[in-house]
Image (spheres, grey):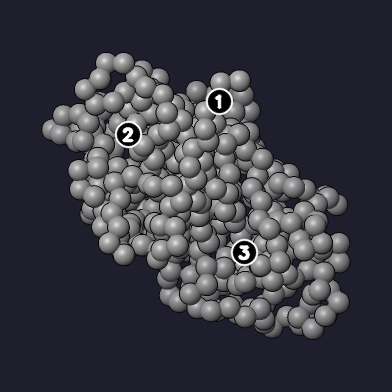
């Protein structure tokens, strides 16, 4: 099926600016609560949220095989399970309905009232029920920086790093959408020079600039997914902030890796941008040396996407500071390789599983994807507007990620994931 929704000449009768993330060529999917307190699955064009359940009930999806309640759910999981052919058909249909040449809905005021909402009239929700969450460690620049800071600078990468997409399983219950505030976590840390740990609020809260992909029902127990077939089982992508407590992590991560330092909060953007929408922005992935083992070898070179990524830090009642500009294309291990490796042992992947990219750092200091790197382990404080500095985050700081692709006048964006850090609760042993 042709992806007609991607037609770069297409214009919408819903007005939006050229720098809008949600052009008619995007058609992302999300879940929101309407002004009438109804939860529904929808999409977005410009500053308008579109109720897909209303579109279906009013007969706009004729010819597409959909269950009657597929858009009446509070998550996208069932829609994702319907498969790539259905996702593509719905995107194409929405693009046609809102094309400026199509007057069917454009001049039907009664139907528009039931279908189209101003974006500030809806409340975005987590887009999927996330049964499992895996976080990878796939940026060579990030892994090298961390290795240089804490290990031998001449041997920054661990022996396995260039051979496998390293990852760990995270906690899905603490994944939240953009807009939810994050409490500073408490835990054990080992002060410098001490031999006995102390308990208290983390003093080194950091962000990690990531994206994540969301999977379909991909394989059965015991089956693997071929690397060149991986994208057939990926619904789309979101922005992801893997909030981190660096001081807790330093004490706890040997030998089994992050635990409390990561599972207190992970935040994602609410709109899922499909791989179909990202298709025009494919670019070559980095050259891999040594050549990976056969099951990770990709037959094509254009295996990644040119997605611009930005990080803003906003102190309470102050101006926003652009502190990092990176790009998804820098990732050494691709999403194809991540999914192929995840399943090579027969691990089953389900609809709505979330796979984090790992921190995305570029080659220049201005493109580093964490405060740990931007301040080089707090040795070089970051200068902000209004004379403030940061080594790690302070209470009431807000971190905002933005991401977008742009080519030939077409922009496909993710919106943002933005969350404020709140003070820790007082500890009470009940």
Determine whether label 3 and label 1 are within 8 Å by CB.
no
Of labels 3 and 1, the one closer to you: 1
How far apart are the alpha carbons under marks 2 and 1? 51 Å
Give the residue drawn at x 34%, y 31%.
247
Which quadrant of the figure contains the N terminus? bottom right
Give the residue drawn at x 50%, y 23%.
345
Q: Which residue is mark 1?
A: 428
Q: Label 2: state its secondary structure.
A: loop
Q: Which numbered disc covers residue 292?
A: 2
How far apart are the alpha carbons under marks 3 and 1? 47 Å
Q: Which residue is mark 3?
A: 27
Residue 223 as seen in the image, left or right of residue 164: right
Q: Label 3: state its secondary structure.
A: loop
Pinpoint residue 92: horizontal percent, then vertical percent.
67, 65
Picture quadrant of residue 272? bottom right
Q: Label 1: state its secondary structure.
A: loop
How far apart are the alpha carbons under marks 3 and 2? 35 Å
């Amino acid at each position: 099926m042709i992806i007609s929704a991607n037609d770069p000449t297409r214009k919408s009768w819903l007005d939006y600016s050229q720098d809008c993330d949600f052009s008619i060529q995007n058609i992302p999917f999300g879940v929101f609560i309407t002004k009438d307190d109804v939860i529904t699955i929808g999409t977005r064009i410009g500053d308008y949220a579109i109720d897909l359940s209303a579109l279906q009930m009013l007969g706009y999806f004729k010819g597409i095989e959909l269950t009657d309640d597929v858009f009446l759910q509070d998550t996208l999981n069932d829609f994702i399970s319907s498969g790539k052919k259905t996702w593509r058909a719905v995107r194409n249909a929405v693009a046609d309905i809102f094309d400026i040449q199509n007057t069917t809905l454009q001049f039907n005021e009664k139907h528009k009232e039931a279908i189209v909402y101003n974006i500030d009239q809806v409340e975005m929700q987590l887009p999927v029920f996330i049964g499992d969450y895996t976080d990878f460690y796939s940026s060579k620049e990030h892994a090298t920086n961390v290795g240089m800071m804490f290990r031998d600078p001449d041997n920054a990468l661990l022996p396995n790093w260039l051979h496998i997409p390293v990852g760990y399983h995270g906690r899905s219950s603490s994944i939240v959408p953009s807009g939810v505030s994050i409490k500073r976590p408490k835990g054990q840390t080992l002060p410098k020079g001490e031999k006995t740990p102390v308990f208290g609020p983390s003093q080194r809260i950091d962000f990690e600039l990531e994206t994540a992909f969301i999977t379909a029902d991909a394989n059965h127990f015991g089956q693997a997914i071929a690397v060149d077939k991986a994208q057939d089982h990926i619904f789309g992508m979101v922005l992801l902030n893997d909030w981190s407590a660096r001081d807790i992590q330093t004490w706890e991560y040997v030998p089994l890796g992050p635990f409390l330092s990561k599972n207190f909060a992970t935040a994602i953007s609410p709109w899922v941008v499909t791989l179909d929408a990202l298709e025009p922005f494919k670019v070559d992935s980095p050259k891999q040396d040594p050549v990976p083992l056969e099951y990770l070898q990709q037959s094509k070179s254009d295996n990644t996407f040119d997605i611009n990524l930005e990080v803003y830090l906003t102190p309470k009642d102050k101006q926003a500071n652009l502190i990092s500009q990176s790009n998804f294309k820098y990732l050494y291990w691709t999403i194809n390789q991540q999914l192929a490796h995840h399943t090579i042992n027969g691990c089953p992947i389900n609809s709505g599983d979330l796979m984090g990219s790992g921190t995305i750092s570029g080659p220049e200091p201005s493109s580093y994807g964490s405060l740990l790197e931007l301040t080089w382990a707090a040795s070089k404080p970051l200068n902000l507007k209004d004379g403030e500095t940061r080594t790690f985050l302070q209470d009431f700081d807000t971190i905002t990620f933005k991401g977008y692709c742009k080519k030939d006048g077409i922009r496909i964006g993710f919106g943002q994931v933005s969350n404020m850090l709140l003070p820790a609760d007082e500890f009470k042993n009940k």
